[in-house]
Amino acid sequence: MRKIKVTPYKILAGVILAVLAVFFLFPLYWILTGSVKTAAVINDAVPQWFPMSPTMDNYERLFDNPALLWLFNSVAMAVLSMILTCVTAAMAGYALAKKRFIGRTILFSIFICAMALPKQVILIPLLREMSFLHLHDTMWAVILPTVGWPFGVFLMKQFSENIPGELLEAARIDGAGEARTFTEIALPIIKPGIGALAIFTFINCWNDYFLQLIMLNSRTKLTISLGIAKLQAEMSTDFGLIMAGAALAAVPIITIFLLFQKYFTRGITMGAVKG
Amino acid sequence: MNKRMKPTGMQKALIRRETISAYLFLLPALIFFVGFVIVPMVMCLVTSFFNYSMTEFAFVGFSNYVEMFQDEIFIKALQNTILIVVVAVPVVTVFSLWVSSVIYKMNGAVCSFFRCIFYLPVVTGTVAVTVVWKWMFNKYTGLFNYVLGETGIIDSDISWLGDERTAIWCIILILLTTSVGQPVVLYVSALGNVDESLIEAAQVDGATSRQVFWKIKWPQIMPTTLYILVITTINSFQCYALIQLLTSGGPNHSTETIMYYIYYQAFKLYRYGYGNAMGVILAIIIAVFSAVQFKVAGRNND
Amino acid sequence: MKNWKKWMSLLLCAGMMTGLSACSGGGESADGGNDGGSSAGTQITLWTYPIGSWGDSATVDGIVAAFNEQYPDISVSVEYLDYTSGDDQVTAAIEAGTAPDIIMEGPERLVTTWGAAGKMADLSDLWDDEALSDISAVSEAVVNACKSSDGAYYEYPLCMNAHCMAINYEVFEEADALQYIDEETRTWTTEDFGNALQALKDAGVETTGIVYCGGQGGDQGTRALAKNLYSAEFTNAEHTEWTMNSEAGIKGLQQLVDWDQAGLLSHDAGLQAADELQLFANGTVAMSFAWNASNESNYAEQIDFTAYAMTFPSDDGVPELDGGIYGFGIFDNGDEAKIDAAKQFIEFVCDDETQGPQSVIASGFFPVRSSFGNVYEGTDQEERMTVFNSMMPYLGDYYNVTPGWADQRTAWWNMLQNIFNGNDVTESVNAYVETSTAATQAASGN
């Protein structure tokens, strides 16, 4: 480790970072503590910084709902989307970046343009489609559009730009087939990119509240995001209950993120953006 | 790898082979993309020319588009959306670049710690984050009024989400906290991958740290910057869940965004055609913004 | 070697196909189960909005179990909607062709929205002479609300209630403001109300009441408050025009603004009824404009003062309360067997001699059938419900069936935000009426 000079700027930066850290951590702290506070404490105008008399009551009421099932649904949906997206996007991104083929430019432009289109707009047509495929109110109605979203392809194309052409050429001269070139030369190089795409897809799918809302009705098929939103009723806002739901939604995914973060975030750099 | 030569017979065969194999690689992605993005997108474009609702389906030409620009709420939503983008995109980019440039040199654990902190609101989940902010902004039982009141910064409680002057800024604040995570992660990696030998060479030549940043690091992280700009722009334009869960577009349409208004027209009033037309316009606006960013940033890139 | 890529793509395709077929297979097997049941009986779905305990699975499961004792061949699966996203889910389900068979809500949705869109089945055969006369005996308005303009019935009602307001009795007592209410009839005049606000303020009550306008949640309270102050009509009798821009309507809204500016009353564009009720339950505000029998029982645990139900203040002392008429509608999904089964369910739930009153009690409201009498008699809720029952005669016109209702609701809370922000009341109300009228014309143009 190099010796780092301490300058006033660095001290100031450290202080600002510390303040920001508190600011970013606080909502989570407030969710976790809120989830064990009683209604009376929550609704008091004077906030209780630390739950003095913690209660499990909110969680008990939360588990009157099939909350664990919702959590499972969310995870299953996000994991499936993640796997399908990574596989399809890695292959497509590689081809777009490293193959010179007819229609490449136009195809990539279409992918880019499609990213700009707001998802909500295509919901009604998507509904019709899912209904036609008999997939409405199944998790596939959420997964398929998520996988189709061109963002992953775009991202993987950027990563694949980093694959040195000479390596591919060398593999070809050695007589490696297309698939082997891809799996043995390209994949190891873009692996960090796939890691990044995996976590982005997982989180995007997890957070895609509106798509889930529109595509799922059955109580047993809801996701945890939908579940929490549903806990807000018209005639009462039970923050304790909602915080318990939020905690249940947040804690597992944060744990996963903390465990795997070094794999997800190691060595991600974008390739140059070229049309 | 692509040597530009006049295609000979051999070359043509090669191109054909490349094309076939490329499309085989693309096939799985294309199935999903065409099936669940392009097809609905075309349906959306087509139906934007129809008076399309739960009960009706009649061709009306451009009248949805004409109506849109006479619709005061749409104009207001457009203004708000652009305000959000114009504030959020630069702030997110500059903020995450600054944070990353401070933390990337720190030792591994500290760097990871901060990176996680900034990523937390993203992994916590939009809905969970939104509901806790809703509580903190509450006029009577929220934290903000208590803290600001106790410290004497404000005299009387503020209805943060219920006041035209503050509501949109509250939304932008929440949007910022949920938007910087990914850019910070990306910038930290990008800065970590900047060629050390170039930096050292420059330092030997007596370059100041500012010069090192702008002359060496900045060009190398440009692709990351461009990516962040584009993604943040798209996300900010499509800001919806925050509005729906917090303000329903109020007070007095001050937090109405196009995305929310599209949702309102389509799902509350069943005006699918009109909503789709607005969606088409929004897509065009986003595409223009992105294209400009590509042009500007891409030029520096070369 | 070249075969690799073929293998790979083949594998991928095969993988995807299995994936797809597995999922559609999964869907089918669930459906298959239902179809398997259909040889013996029928599978129907019921979606409920949270109307009292009808949003609560323990209660509804009990009702379904009672139904199955008589009709073992019909199995009912239930989903619970909420008022925040429920409408969107129904819209999505209609467009996706997965709408439920039975849905429980009120005429503004069943008749004016989905009924008018041609999505509902006509329930005329449930409305036999006996039902018609029994329900008419309680209120002719209920019958009219459930009937669409083309004469079809899209709702079969179960219960009704009158939305009212509530005051914190102890706070009023302390502020010596009880003199302004008539404890006998639970009514007060606009003048009394103003005096009470002043008395509360003088006694140091920081926030007397809040005109919430952060969204449409519980907007019946703000509507009732504004229109009763000077006895305005919300719509014309034919339900074709919005009339809050009448002299009385503007006067009432202006009065609210004046009180707000004088600090006697508050407004909050960040709150909806749920938030306001919570503040009332905490004791932060001295009155709630979103009260009813069901809310009283929901908040009973949290409230440690006397939540005293009152009617809305009116210049003549005779309020016109906004009502709710809740009942069932059937989505016409094109399957006669299911529609018939759904009708049997509705008939059982609403008309059965023992189940009917139980279904009403589950809602926490009052029966639409006069033959049910007082369903709360002899229960521990009798005393509490007598209070609310005494307000039922004040039930006013059910104008919620006016076409363009959904647009009007949004325009209403936006208009309130406008006038409390200091914009001219007359202008704002006119703009609100204009927006709503345009929607009404568009909706009835079809």
Image (spheres, rainbow, N blue to C red):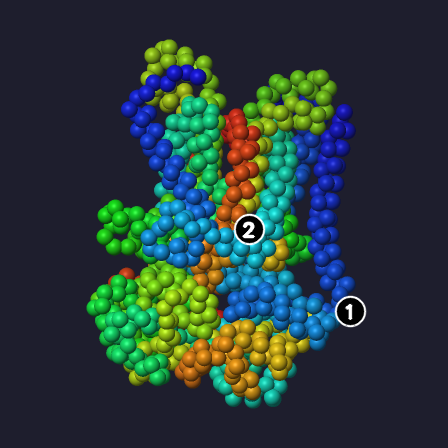
Residue C380 visible in the displayed image: yes
Query: Residue B58 vs residue C183: left or right?
Result: right
Across and down, in percent, residue C204 comes to: 23, 65
Q: Residue at x 71, y 70 (%)?
A: C74
Give above or below for C244 relative to B7.
below
Query: Residue C202 vs residue B284: left or right?
Result: left
Give, as a three-letter code, the residue at label 2: Ile
Which type of secondary structure does the marked residue at label 1 adopt? helix
Query: Residue A264 vs residue A10: left or right?
Result: right
Query: Quick one: quadrant of the C terminus of chain B?
Result: top left
Which dot marks residue A224? 2
Which type of secondary structure does the marked residue at label 2 adopt? helix
For mark 1, name the chain: C
Across and down, in percent, residue B107 comes to: 44, 23
How dense is the environment of label 1, judged by Cα within 10 Å: few (below 14), some, or many (20 and up)? few
Residue picked out by circle 1: C40
Residue C112 visible in the displayed image: no
Give above or below for B119 relative to C281.
above
Residues marked 2 and 1, same chain: no
Pointer 2 with pointer 1, Cβ within 8 A: no
Residue A39 lies in quadrant: bottom left
| Residue projecting furthest to the right | C39
Across and down, in percent, residue A211 comes to: 55, 51
Q: Residue at x 59, y 79 (%)?
A: C356
Across and down, in percent, residue B254 comes to: 35, 55
